[in-house]
Image (tube, helix red, strand yellow):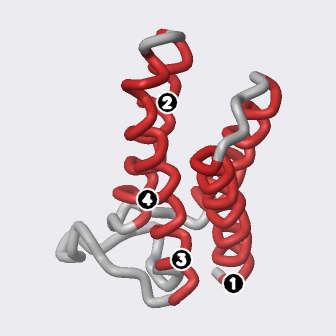
Amino acid sequence: MSSRSVAADSREALVSLPSNPVAYVAILAALVTAAIHLYLAPQVIGFDQTTGILFYLNGLGFIGGIVLFVSRYWRGAFYLIAIVYALATIVAFFLLDGPVNPMSIVAKIAEVIVALTAAYLYSVE
């Protein structure tokens, strides 16, 4: 994906699989945290509607990022946005004093992996 030019050829496929194996790690980590947030959202919304909605939005945000990442519209600068987004979700968890449980730990580890892999992919682009 890093070899694509900004002026994409109109015949270029809408979706292209990444050539760097690290990109697959980023996709998997984003899927893990998205799945956790979307799974927990209905439970969380039962006791805090705002947090539940944020869980849905966060899960959908990571899925949207994956879709954009494998599309022809992906640009190198988006790695920086992915880093900030992943780190913002981690900071928000601690600022909002989220409950520490196995699922939250896995989600935060996945988000750290997203940030680290995005930083690596940005550096090799």
Which residue is labeled 1 in the image? 124
Query: In the rendered view, would you say 63 is above or below 110?
Result: above
Q: Where is residue 30 in the image (x, y as percent from the top left)?
A: 50, 59
SS for dot 3: helix
Separation of residues labelled 4 and 1 (CA atoms) = 23 Å
SS for dot 4: helix
- State left or right for residue 97 relative to residue 12: right
Give the residue at x 34% y 57%: 67
SS for dot 2: helix
Give the residue at x 41% y 59%: 66
Query: In the rendered view, would you say 47 is above or below 92?
Result: above
Location of the C terminus by quadrant is: bottom right
Which residue is labeled 4 in the image? 31
Q: Which amino acid does label 1 sit on?
A: Val
Query: Looking at this view, is 25 or 6 the one in front?
Result: 25
Query: Looking at this view, is 41 or 67 the one in front?
Result: 41
Q: Determine contact: label 4, label 2, CB under 8 Å.
A: no
SS for dot 1: helix
Separation of residues labelled 4 and 2 (CA atoms) = 14 Å
Which residue is labeled 2 in the image? 55
Q: Determine contact: label 3, label 1, CB under 8 Å.
A: no
Location of residue 90 (image quadrant): top right
**Mark 2 / mark 3, whichever is N-terminal:** 3
Q: Nearer the viewer, mark 2 or mark 1?
A: 2
Query: In the rendered view, would you say 1 is above or below 102?
Result: below
Which residue is labeled 3 in the image? 25
Separation of residues labelled 3 and 1 (CA atoms) = 15 Å
**Mark 4 / mark 2, whichever is N-terminal:** 4
Separation of residues labelled 2 and 3 (CA atoms) = 22 Å
Q: Where is residue 91 in the image (x, y as percent from the top left)?
A: 79, 37
Q: What residue type is labelled 3?
A: Val
**Mark 3 / mark 4, whichever is N-terminal:** 3
